[in-house]
Image (spheres, grey):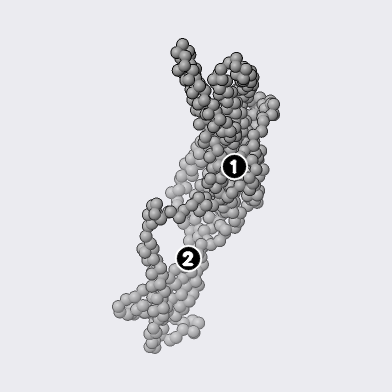
Amino acid sequence: MTIEQKNPPFKKALMIFGVIGTLAMGGCSTTAVKYDASNVSGFTDSTLRPQAVPLATDAPLNIDDVRTRTLAHNSEYSRAQTQLMETVRKAGIRGKDFFPQAYANSYGTWRNNASASIGKKVDDTSRTMPKDFYTAQDQAAARSNLTTSWDLLEIGLSGFKANRRTINAYSQSEQNQYQCNKMMVDVENAYWRAVAFEQAEKKSTWLKNRVAYALDLSQQRADQNPDTKLQELMFQRELIDINRWYQSLYRSLLSAKPELARLMNVPAGTNFALESTRLPSNLGELGEKNALDLITTAYQNRPEIRQALYQSDLTKLKNEEDLWRHLPAMRFFLGANHNTNSFVLNQDFASAGLNLSWDILRLGQIGETKRNGKLALAEQRRQTEILASAIMAQVIIAREQMHKLDYDLTLAWKALSVQGEITDDLYKDAQSGAKPETYLVKEELMRELSFIREQMARAELHTAKARLEQSIGIVPICQAPTHLQASVPSPSAL
């Protein structure tokens, strides 16, 4: 029987390959862009910092307003929350490990002569095959197939993967909790230092003018009376030293308000005022607790401890998974195939198969795998112990600092009160002419110096209290669980 050779649809396949090849080579047409001042001139604060939205009110901000604003708009914390959202989404995808891997494959061949050969007649038991049918190969042919495969061992280990994704989500939520706690300490420090700066700034210009006036007046008296010149010069030196001391403290507060603006992520050039509230007369419950109770509270509430526990769970999961991987790998595949060769009897057909492979030499490494797992778990436990020691030290130091700064604030307030009385009495003497006005200016400067020191002591105490709250893991505004953390599935549910 003579079989007429058909022209396969090779041109169509060649066209598809050409289109795909053209698209693949498209990457060669890309070029790198070098940025400089000429092509970034259109960038503004609003384009580079889109989350820096204006404040909702022009009223002075209290500490609660600043905390809320920071949590809502801080770029670093928003990025961490976005990453947590993605981790939670991945943890919530269940059953994806049961899906097969799917591969689409297509290729074509060509030769300059016929692929002819002597064949053997095939016995036809179904009586559907043409008589004397022999196989051969077209000069040009294309083959395509779609194959799906299941790795049965990986499906068996899908429970480990699901638990690992969930634990990673839990661990990342604790990392965000830690970041929130730390950020609130930065907010407290920046806020109260900014309050101190605003209070000092109110009298900054007036104080400069008063000091300049006193120095000029003292110099006039020195020029008029040579007998008191030395005394006047010593007075000027003392006044300048006090002013330099005051200015150094004032300069140390200059960065507080820009830092607070960064934390709140407000647009550049935003002006805002702050409210100043007095501290309570005592340190509250934190001041009454002893160090041991605070350390116990820290172990129960610090997110770093829970992170370490999650890391231990991940290590245990990895150890179990490593042991299971000593089992043989079994892969089942199912595919659909198409061949344009005109000499092939069945150009479209389905295929299936099973592949079993076992690394026999790995069986002797089971003991080593167990040993490595025990070492990794022991190392993780040592890391947890080191972390607990660091937390213990942080709690003790933070508690001692808070009590010492509370006493320092008491002294600063007393010094301000005494200096205020001195200034008031000297003001009366200067008004009556009993004392020169230059002495009054010096005491006014001393009063402002005492005031700024009292404000800084107040800011340090606020920060110390916030740092103690962070050290025991209880920062009220960061305690409420977010909807992201609540949506993480439990390992048992997986």
Q: Residue 223: which quarter of the image?
A: top left
Residue at the far top: name it.
Answer: 227
Q: Is residue 291 among what the camera can see?
A: yes
Residue receiving disc 2 = 103
Relative to 217, is 17 on the left or the right?
A: left
Q: Cα distance, mark 1 to mark 2?
A: 60 Å
> Is the residue marked by circle 1 packed among few (<14), some (14-19), or many (20+) residues within 10 Å?
some
* Residue at left offset 43%, top offset 49%: 361
Please tell me whether residue 341 is drawn above or below residue 150 in the rendered image: below
Relative to 279, is 105 on the left or the right?
A: left
> Is the residue marked by circle 2 packed among few (<14), some (14-19), or many (20+) residues within 10 Å?
few
* Residue at left offset 55%, top offset 38%: 257
What amino acid is labelled 1 in the image?
Answer: Phe
The location of residue 113, given as percent across then percent down, is 30, 79
Mark sitting on residue 365: none
The residue nearer to you, when weighing 369 against 228, is 228
* Residue at left offset 44%, top offset 86%: 130
Q: Secondary structure at mark 1?
A: loop
The quarter of the rendered structure image containing the N terminus is bottom left
The location of residue 425, given as percent across then percent down, is 63, 18
The residue nearer to you, when weighing 39 against 113, is 39
Residue receiving disc 1 = 272
Q: Is residue 404 among what the camera can see?
A: no
* Residue at left offset 61%, top offset 54%: 92
Relative to 382, is 426 on the left or the right?
A: right
What amino acid is labelled 2 in the image?
Answer: Tyr
Q: Residue 98: which quarter of the image?
A: bottom right
Q: Secondary structure at mark 2?
A: strand
Please tell me whether residue 309 is drawn above or below residue 355 in the rendered image: above
The location of residue 243, given as percent across then percent down, is 51, 24
Looking at the rendered image, the disc whose residue lies closer to the viewer, 1 or 2, is: 1
Tell me which numbered mark, 1 or 2, is placed earlier along the sequence: 2
